[in-house]
Every structure is written in C-alpha cells, then in structure tokens.
C-alpha cells in the first residue's frame, strides 16, 4: 500500500510551520481517527486537498519521540537484486545527520510500487521531541534529500560538502567527520593580529599542500569522539562583505604562492548570523609546497620564518626537511637538464633593474 494512502490529515506547511512537535504529537494521540499528519509544501493560498501531495509525514514514535517519513527518488540505475544494498547505503549516508540530532534511521526501503527510475525509497527517521517545530523537521528533510542527491552513487567528499554549503543546507554536514578535506572552527580568526593571520594561512596551506584540497568552515562546532572529531553543531558568526575581503587579503598576504581558485563566501543560516566558507580546490603539484610567511615561536611572531604544513586525516602534519630537500633537488635537476626555464632567463626585469 502507498505509504501516503493510509489516511490522516494533509495540511500545508504554511498552516503548521511554527507548531511544536510536542503539541502536534499530543493532538494526534488524542485523535482516535488518525495517528499521523501529512505535510505539503504547496503554498497555503494555492492549497487544494484534491491535488496536493504530501512531502513528508509526521507520527508519534514512542515515548517522547516522533517519526518522520519521506521519499527520496534515486535517479541512478539499481540492479534487481541490489535494492536492499542500496537501502543500506542510503541509510549509512543519513546516519551521521540523524545521530547529530540524537535520532536514528529506522528504515530505508524501496517503494513496493516502484517499477522504473527514478526509484522512490521510503525513508523513516526517529527523533526525540525536544524543541522541534514542524518547520525544523521540514528543514531536516530538505537537508537529508539534498545530501543524498549530492552524494549520488559516491561517498561524501570535498565537492559534496561544497555543494550542500552552496545550496544553503549546511546542516547536512552535521555528523560528518573532520577529515582530509573538512575542517571547522567555532569562531572567527583574529585577523587584527599577526598570530591570527598566520593561523588562518596555515589552515589554508594544510589543504593547499594536500592532494584533495579542502573546506574550512567558520561557524561550526566540532566534537571529539573515539577515532576523531565530528561536526556537531552550527555556531553561526556575524559575516559581512568586509569580513570576506579581510579573510581573502590575509590569506593572500601570508601565503605563497597564491592559491589557484581560492573561494571565500558566506552561507546563510536560519538565524541572522552566517557561516564563512573558505574553499581550497586541489592544487597543481608544481605549485607546492605552499609557504606561510611568518611563524609563531613561543609567544612571538618571527616574520623571517616560513612554515610548511599539509592536511592528513583530521590532523595537520609538517612537511619534513627531507621532503622539502627532495622537491628542491628535483627542481634543480630539471633546470640543469633544460626541462624548466631558468628563473633568471624567464623573468621580466623590473624597470628599476633596467635603468641600473
């Protein structure tokens, strides 16, 4: 039977947007004729009960819990005997997002009436009531669907994280591990100080010197767990156009060479504050290593020093002296063989040097 043909109330989201889930579940439990409410995103002024279709369903789910059910249309090809495996894969992708809200994935099953792509999977999540509103659940469903669409047939990656951030669904990152491509920071860097600029430049350099690039997100909180650290909560910060420019200028001032394709942009959140995202695409090997002008030694800033770091898993590691020597030696060997132009021959003399 179609999961949305079991009877119940069908209402527009606009009509119940601010309703607390505690009140909704209490009302459903007291109504003997119905134990669930189906929610449609169709605008209230155009809502027609005969033509509207539900986007998700809410129902009591045990003591102090509720369940939300929705459909995700999987556009990819699925072998006849792979339905259960695909359901397990989708459940694994959603588990971190649900666990961040102290919830769990109850089931992910192919719709029994599915005969051709896109394949509709019926997803059920169980969550504690807490302070949820219907609007908050609608946002969670949007985040879940956007995450699954972005991942497609692959796994979570830098490009997937970039997609959900650009789509203004940063909550889809909740539960994801900080990793070789993702780092989060709760508050702004202190760009009024040299220490703050150097710390920012080092964070960017770690990704620029790594193989996959990365995302540095300011306005998210990390949480240590066994085996690493996960993104646990949004912690938005004030972000203006001036802040975006200051971050870009600080990176350009402290990091050499310039990061190819560097992006600095703000992401809206449900409140007034925002997230600030720094995207570092994968860099060409010939540009590496990226050097940070200055280093903090003890409590002092040493302007004549440089630091070289790269990202490994959720940690940063220094590039070793042998590795740096190998890079320099390889460059000198190519110069001797004529496979690279000599810097002195390739450079355009400055006006000052031409007059001397």
Image (cartoon, helix red, strand yellow):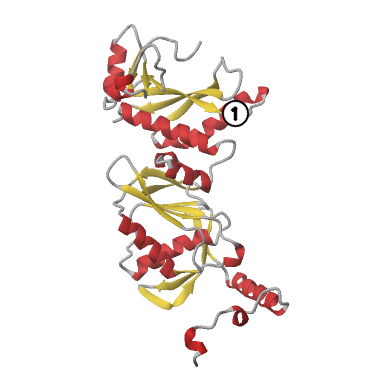
In the image, 261 versus 349, the foreground residue is: 349
Residue 236, compared with residue 64, is above or below; it is below
Where is 254 relative to 3, above or below?
below
Q: For residue 284, what is the image quadrant?
A: bottom right
- Corner quadrant of residue 151: top right
Q: Count neighbours of disc 1 (C-alpha within 10 A) and say few if under 14, some if 14 to 19, many if 20 or more.
A: some
Left or right placement of residue 114 versus residue 36 in this view: right
Q: Nearer the viewer, residue 3 or 26?
A: 3
**Residue 106 appears in view:** yes
Instruction: Give the residue drawn at x 46%, y 35%.
Output: 146
Residue depicted at 64% across the width and 72% down the height:
326
Q: What SS does tag 1 mark?
A: helix
Front-most of residues 213 and 320 = 213
Name the residue tied to disc 1.
Answer: 86
Q: Position of residue 5 (x, y in %)?
A: 45, 11
Observer able to see residue 60: no
Instruction: Report the label total.
Output: 1
x and y percentages locating residue 48 in the rendered image: 35, 15
Give the image location of residue 55, x and y in percent. Answer: 41, 23
Farthest right residue in view: 337
Residue 353 point in image, percent of width and height: 50, 88
Give the residue furthest to the top.
Answer: 33
Q: Quadrant of residue 75?
A: top right
């Amino acid at each position: 039977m179609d999961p949305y043909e079991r009877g119940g109330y069908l209402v527009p989201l606009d009509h119940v947007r601010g309703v607390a889930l505690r009140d909704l579940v209490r009302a459903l439990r007291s109504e003997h004729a119905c134990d669930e409410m189906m929610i449609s995103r169709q605008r209230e002024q155009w809502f027609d009960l005969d033509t509207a279709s539900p986007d998700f369903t809410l129902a009591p789910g045990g003591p102090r819990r509720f369940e939300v059910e929705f459909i995700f249309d999987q556009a990819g090809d699925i072998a006849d005997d792979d339905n259960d495996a695909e359901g397990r894969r989708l459940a694994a992708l959603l588990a971190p997002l649900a666990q961040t809200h102290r919830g769990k994935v109850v089931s992910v099953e192919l719709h029994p009436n599915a005969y051709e792509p896109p394949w509709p999977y019926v997803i059920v999540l169980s969550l504690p009531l807490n302070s949820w509103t219907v609007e908050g659940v609608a946002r969670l469903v949007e985040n879940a669907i956007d995450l699954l669409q972005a991942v497609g047939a692959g796994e979570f990656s830098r490009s997937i994280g970039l997609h959900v951030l650009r789509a203004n669904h940063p909550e889809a990152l909740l539960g994801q591990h900080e990793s070789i491509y993702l780092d989060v920071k709760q508050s702004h860097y202190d760009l009024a100080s040299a220490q703050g600029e150097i710390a920012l430049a080092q964070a960017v350099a770690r990704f620029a010197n790594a193989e996959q690039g990365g995302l540095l997100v300011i306005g998210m909180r990390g949480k240590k767990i066994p085996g690493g650290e996960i993104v646990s909560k949004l912690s938005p910060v004030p972000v203006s156009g001036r802040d975006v420019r200051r971050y870009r200028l600080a990176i350009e001032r402290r990091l050499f060479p310039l990061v190819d394709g560097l992006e600095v942009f703000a992401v809206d959140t449900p409140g007034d504050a925002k997230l600030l995202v720094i995207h570092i695409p994968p860099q060409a090997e010939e540009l590496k290593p990226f050097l940070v002008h200055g280093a903090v030694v003890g409590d002092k800033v040493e302007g004549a020093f440089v630091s070289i770091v790269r990202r490994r898993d959720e940690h940063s590691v220094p590039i070793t002296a042998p590795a740096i020597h190998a890079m320099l030696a390889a460059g000198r060997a190519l110069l001797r063989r004529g496979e690279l132009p000599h810097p002195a021959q390739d450079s355009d003399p400055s006006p000052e040097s031409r007059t001397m």
